[in-house]
Amino acid sequence: MNNNIAQVRARSVWDSRGRPTVEAEVHLAGGAIGRAIAPAGASRGKYEAVDLRDGGSRFGGMGVERAVAAVNGEIAPLLIGADAREQDQIDARLCRADGTPNKGRVGGNATVAVSMAAAHAAAAAEGVPLWRWLSRGGPVSLPLPEIQIFGGGAHAGRRTDIQDFMIMVPKAASIREVLEVTGDVYRAAGEVMQDRDRMVGTADEGGWWPMFDTNEQALETLVEAIERAGHRPGEDVFISLDIAASEFAEGNGYVLALDDARSSSEEMVERVCDWAARYPILSIEDPVGQDDTPGMVAVTRRLGGRIQIIGDDYLVTNSDRVDAAAAAGACNAVLVKVNQAGSLSEAKAALDAAQRRQWGTIVSARSGETEDVTIAHLAVGWNARQLKVGSFARSERMAKWNELLRIEEALGADNRFDGIRAFAPGVSAGLGA
């Protein structure tokens, strides 16, 4: 089959928040077609690739017609004739087309949609699922899910300072078992909220909207929900936090509005370590802000031997920042968001940099998602071992979890679910791996 790109086009579609986003299609000369949709984040690191938005009054300034025009008018001619199987070359052309450090000219939403669509087209031309194409014949594994139960921060009107209260089930034997346990806990959490007359609705990613008086009350309620569901906190089910501390960093410190507390970097580190000592927490994302390297080093030194310390805004899916963090002793895991980097190749480079150091690697969705299931395939095909999608509700989230079930079934006897082996060695060893 002729794998050369014959046509590239884009259109404006809608994401899970009812905002416009970019969908790209890549058509190959042999007839194969790939399609992908760019996600969008609410909590964004200042160093990540940026979306190109139209501004003005239409759609509250969130329109993407400029990004669509960039694909159809400028990017498409640069890719015509390129071999869709050469992902690195395609992404290099996308980077050259933009020419800025943060994809600000044509838009990271334009480049990431085209980059993912090209990969889908290449896989379709080979007649294999995307995860198989991405693996290039290497080992694959099913990722350990990290699933939101309560949504906070920028995803829920900042009703809590902490952005995500999640669970992980690392000792499960399969994806199906993880999702069944999660379903139990999600329902139980809703019952607890209803019993206390605190049921309001759901946040951006499908987790329960947090009506708590303190951040710690959310942790207590999550432990209660795990127990009500018939599981053992710290044995069967563990807590994972996305603190997203950059969102409440102020000056050289932090302001936790719900707790009416102002903290220095050192005090924020102590607060996080105290939570880790008193609750069954297995993973913490962005415990301090994106520019607080001393704080990140301190948290990693204190907790990194037994808890996963993830850099999100701190690392922004950037291989150079992963290298610098490793040299400083900060983090033992990286969150990989393709749209933070702007292309598949750049995101994969960050993942590879982390895996060379035996860090944990977590492919992640964004708060503004769609029915696109690309990240489920990335997590498997790149052998990332962990996947963060959001909650256990809303079709844009469940589409990814359901796709994992299909991949698990397709793998059959070759299925490998890493579970407790999904983390950096010290964390896995603490779980009995």
Image: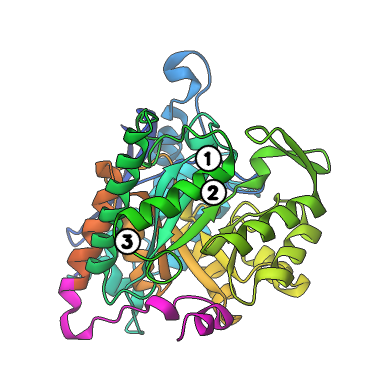
Residue position marked by numbered label 1 in the rendering:
106
Q: CB of mark 2 within 8 Å of CB of mark 1? A: yes
User: Which image quarter holds the C terminus?
Assistant: bottom left
Tell me the SS state at disc 1.
loop
- Numbered circle sitting on residue 376: 3
Q: Specify whether residue 105 is painted magenta.
A: no
| Distance of label 3 from label 1 (alpha carbons) | 26 Å
Magenta segment main secondary structure: helix
Q: Specify whether residue 421 is painted magenta.
A: yes
Q: CB of mark 3 within 8 Å of CB of mark 2? A: no
- Badge 3 or badge 2: first in the primary sequence: 2
Q: CB of mark 3 within 8 Å of CB of mark 1? A: no
Q: Residue at x 34, y 71 (%)?
A: 380
User: Relative to residue 405, is residue 307 drawn left or right?
Assistant: right
Which range of residues does the magenta coloring cover? 409-433
Q: Is residue 40 above or below residue 423?
A: above
Task: Residue 83: tell me if it is visible.
Answer: no
| Distance of label 3 from label 2 (alpha carbons) | 28 Å
Q: Nearer the viewer, residue 133 or 225?
A: 225
- Badge 2 or badge 1: first in the primary sequence: 2
Q: Nearer the viewer, residue 346 or 147?
A: 147
| Between marks 2 and 1 in the image, the one whose residue lies nearer the viewer | 1
Task: Identify residue type, mark 2.
Answer: Ala
At label 3, counting other C-alpha atoms closer than 10 Å, the crowd grade (few under 14, some 14-19, many 20 or more) is many
Tell me the SS state at disc 2.
helix
Tell me the SS state at disc 3.
helix
- Numbered circle sitting on residue 272: none
At label 1, counting other C-alpha atoms closer than 10 Å, the crowd grade (few under 14, some 14-19, many 20 or more) is many
Q: Is residue 285 above or below residue 131?
A: above
User: Relative to residue 192, is residue 355 drawn left or right?
Assistant: right
User: Relative to residue 264, is residue 89 drawn left or right?
Assistant: left
Task: Identify residue type, mark 3.
Answer: Ala
